[in-house]
């Protein structure tokens, strides 16, 4: 037994030595990398449903290289990539295990800080931060006929309160399920898009907008808006809304097939209002020449937002284009046509300090971070990103 034990220890140490030699020195091991990072990237390999996601991170997007063969962590076994990110931490609902998790990416590893049992909703349909440590998540029950909320204290993942949101409009004829959109929080009120659907996911030719009292989660007012059907996707996978200066909630409507017009609109609701602003709308589809928009928008500051759309003139696959839109004049300011054609995945861009950072999965010339400076109107090429991937599932900052 003694000799067997010695042989086992020797074999284990040999395996660890081989693994460490296969990684870049100073990368990937338990003591490698930085303790804290500013930015992260999720790279996807393979095709759905056999897709593997890798997380890498950096503190400088202007140079260097991210290489998933030498650094980073495979994350599929730890949770989904439906990430809610705040103050350097990641929050994730792993529905197949009935667990709500708090992660920290440190020293090139995604580590679990805390996890608690959670099965109150079927999945996160929408979420909003009330303050730095108070998170509201909203979702449907398994039958799709009730909308529930949970308020978490994210410092320890304790539940402050939870329940069912009361006061939505009744189901109209032929529609028996809810379809939730995005939401925001402004001065004691939650603004929430919602709609209805049938068993085939067909929705009516309108959407609904609710103002909810945060103190008791009762609907103060709910109206029907027939300017568009569909709702924005409020889940952590996408970003299809923004709140500007705590004064107005800007949100899109993405109609489903068979639900009237398929054009994408931008609407808004002003602080203190009980319904959408009837005088404000932008037909984003028409604004980009009738081309197909992707489910991601981002506010840049100075009344400018960026949208991602498909430009067929670039080819059949790598045809993603980015356009800057003035939300007051309702016009395209410019198209970032200096960038190579992109094959976007889900959330591949973010804004920090009036600079737009885009992870471009390019058809030629390699994958890089591209940086657009709103103040100088100039574009520069930054960090080298992994090549030969399916796409970048998430490119974001850890801190606001």
Image: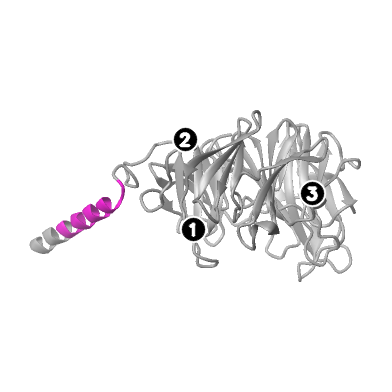
Give the spatial CA distance, label 2 vs label 1: 22 Å
State the SS at label 3.
helix
Residue at the left extreme? 3
- Toward the bottom, the furthest residue is 200
Observer able to see residue 140: no
Q: Position of residue 236 (x, y in %)?
A: 62, 50
Query: What residue is at 86 percent from the left and 69 percent from the top?
Result: 174
Give the percent coordinates (x, y) of residue 349. 60, 44
Can you say whether 256 is above or below 341 in the image? below
- Earlier along the polypeptide chain: callout 3 or callout 1? 3
> Quadrant of the image for the C terminus?
top right
**Residue of label 2:** 60
- Can residue 245 be seen by looking at this rendering? yes
- Please report the bounds of the magenta region as a residue range: 10-24
- Give the residue pinned by disc 3: 284
Q: Is mark 2 on a helix, strand or loop?
A: loop
Magenta span contains residue 23: yes
Give the numbered dot on residue 389: 1
């Amino acid at each position: 037994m003694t000799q067997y034990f010695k042989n086992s220890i020797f074999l284990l140490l040999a395996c660890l030595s081989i693994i460490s030699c296969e990684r870049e020195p100073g990368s990937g091991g338990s003591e490698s990398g930085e303790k804290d990072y500013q930015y992260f990237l999720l790279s996807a390999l393979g095709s759905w449903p056999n897709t593997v996601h890798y997380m890498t991170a950096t503190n400088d997007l202007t140079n260097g290289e991210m290489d998933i063969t030498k650094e980073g962590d495979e994350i599929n076994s730890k949770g989904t990539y439906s990430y809610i990110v705040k103050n350097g931490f990641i929050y994730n609902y792993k529905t197949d295990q009935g667990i709500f998790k708090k992660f920290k990416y440190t020293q090139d590893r995604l580590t679990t800080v805390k996890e608690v049992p959670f099965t109150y909703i079927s999945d996160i349909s929408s979420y909003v931060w009330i303050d730095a440590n108070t998170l509201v998540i909203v979702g449907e029950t398994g039958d799709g006929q009730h909308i529930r909320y949970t308020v978490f204290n994210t410092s320890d993942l304790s539940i402050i309160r939870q329940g069912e949101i009361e006061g939505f409009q009744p189901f109209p004829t032929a529609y028996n399920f809810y379809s939730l959109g995005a939401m925001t929080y402004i001065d004691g009120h939650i603004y929430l898009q919602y709609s209805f659907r049938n068993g085939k996911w067909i929705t009516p030719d309108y959407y609904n907008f609710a103002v909810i009292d945060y103190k008791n989660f009762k609907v103060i007012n709910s109206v029907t808006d027939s300017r568009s059907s569909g709702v924005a996707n409020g889940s952590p996978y996408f970003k299809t809304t923004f709140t500007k200066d705590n004064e107005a909630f800007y949100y899109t409507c993405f109609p489903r097939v068979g639900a009237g017009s398929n054009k994408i609109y931008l609407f808004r609701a002003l602080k203190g209002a009980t319904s959408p602003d009837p005088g404000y709308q932008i037909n984003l589809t028409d604004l980009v020449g009738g081309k197909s928009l992707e489910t991601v928008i981002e506010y840049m500051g100075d009344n400018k937002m960026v949208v991602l759309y498909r430009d067929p003139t670039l080819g059949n696959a790598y045809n993603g284009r980015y356009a800057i839109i003035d939300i007051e004049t309702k016009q395209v300011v410019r198209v970032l046509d200096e960038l190579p054609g992109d094959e976007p995945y889900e959330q591949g861009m973010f804004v920090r300090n009036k600079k737009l950072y885009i992870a471009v999965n390019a058809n030629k010339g390699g994958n890089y971070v591209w940086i657009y400076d709103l103040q100088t109107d100039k574009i520069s090429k930054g960090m080298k990103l992994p090549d030969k991937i399916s796409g970048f599932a998430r490119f974001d900052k850890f801190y606001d």
